[in-house]
Image: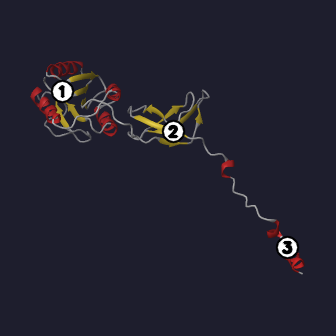
């Protein structure tokens, strides 16, 4: 029985490239899922982690330059292949945290060679533990619709966006960055009240407040 090929996610906004790559890789035994942009690729990966991600670098919406760092941080065991027709050769373009680079038009042999180089390595588990630390915040604000919200700074792209607080509060909440699609865990704590910081009142016995004259009388 032939050995099962790894699972792949292909992200490319060119429909013809998605179709041709999917057909070729499926015929040689790979399990392929193909999407048109970075956000959709991230959703597929979070639903079921593949062994390899093939991502075009230039896509509308969430580009490969934005997608690859998110996947590298959240799923460090996924092998990343950057693809582009704007770069040539085998060197990984600067700013793309990938394990390999495939120049579009380099031929099927080159692509299969990259994938085969990964096959001897330890396969990825289909589900990985979530070890992302949540962002802790205490400041709540209210918008014009009288809704509570917090302001979150994305740890990946460092851009800031508001997050509405709907429904009952949970210890740890999750959302996606409004800009890069990065999954963010956050926790909203109740702000401390002044009563919680009231200085402790030292209770002293009456004898410590006696005047010097009173003490003299008691001594005599």
Real-space Cα separation, disc 1 to disc 3, in angstroms:
91 Å
Report the front residue among 7 and 88: 7
Is residue 28 left or right of 195 when viewed as pictured?
Answer: left
Asked if the residue under mark 2 is in contact with the one under mark 3, i.e. CB atoms within 8 Å, the reply is no
Secondary structure of the residue carrying tag 2 is strand
The picture places residue 175, in percent across and down from the top left corner, at 45, 32
**Residue at image x 49%, y 36%?**
172
Residue 118, by quadrant, is top left
Q: CA distance from mark 1 to mark 2?
A: 40 Å
Q: Residues within 10 Å of mark 3 (few under 14, many from 20)?
A: few
Which of disc 3 and disc 1 is earlier in sequence?
1
Residue 141 point in image, percent of width and height: 59, 36
- Residue drawn at x 31%, y 25% as measured from the top left: 37
Q: Secondary structure at mark 1?
A: loop
Q: Give whichever of 220, 43 is nearer the camera.
A: 220
Determine which residue is flagged by label 1.
Answer: 5
Quick one: SS at disc 3? loop
Q: Is residue 119 above or below residue 198?
A: above
In the figure, residue 154 lies in which quadrant? top left
Instruction: Please tell me which residue lies in front, 214 or 175.
Output: 214
153 over 35 or under it: above or below: below
Image quadrant in which you'd find residue 77: top left
Q: Give the crowd class for mark 1: few <14, some 14-19, many >=20 residues within 10 Å.
A: some
Disc 2 marks which residue?
187
Please name the residue that numbered disc 3 is placed on: 211
- The residue lying furthest to the front in this view is 1
């Amino acid at each position: 029985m032939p050995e099962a090929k790894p699972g792949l996610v292909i992200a490319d906004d060119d429909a013809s490239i998605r179709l041709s790559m999917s057909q070729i890789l499926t015929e040689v035994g790979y399990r392929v899922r193909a999407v048109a942009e970075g956000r959709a690729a991230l959703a597929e990966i979070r639903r079921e982690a593949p062994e390899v991600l093939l991502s075009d670098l230039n896509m509308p919406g969430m580009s490969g330059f934005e997608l690859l760092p998110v996947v590298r941080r959240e799923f460090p065991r996924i092998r990343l292949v950057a693809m582009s027709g704007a770069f040539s050769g085998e060197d990984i373009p600067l700013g793309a945290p990938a394990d390999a680079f495939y120049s579009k038009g380099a031929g099927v042999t080159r692509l299969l060679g990259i994938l085969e180089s990964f096959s001897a390595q330890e396969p990825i588990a289909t589900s990985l533990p979530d070890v992302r630390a949540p962002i802790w915040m205490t400041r709540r604000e209210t918008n014009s619709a009288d809704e509570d919200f917090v302001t979150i700074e994305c740890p990946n792209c460092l851009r800031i966006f508001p997050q509405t607080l709907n429904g009952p509060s949970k210890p740890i909440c999750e959302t996606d960055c409004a800009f890069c699609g990065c999954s963010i865990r956050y926790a909203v704590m109740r702000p401390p009240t002044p009563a919680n910081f009231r200085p402790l009142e030292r209770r002293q016995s009456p004898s410590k407040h006696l005047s010097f004259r009173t003490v003299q009388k008691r001594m005599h």
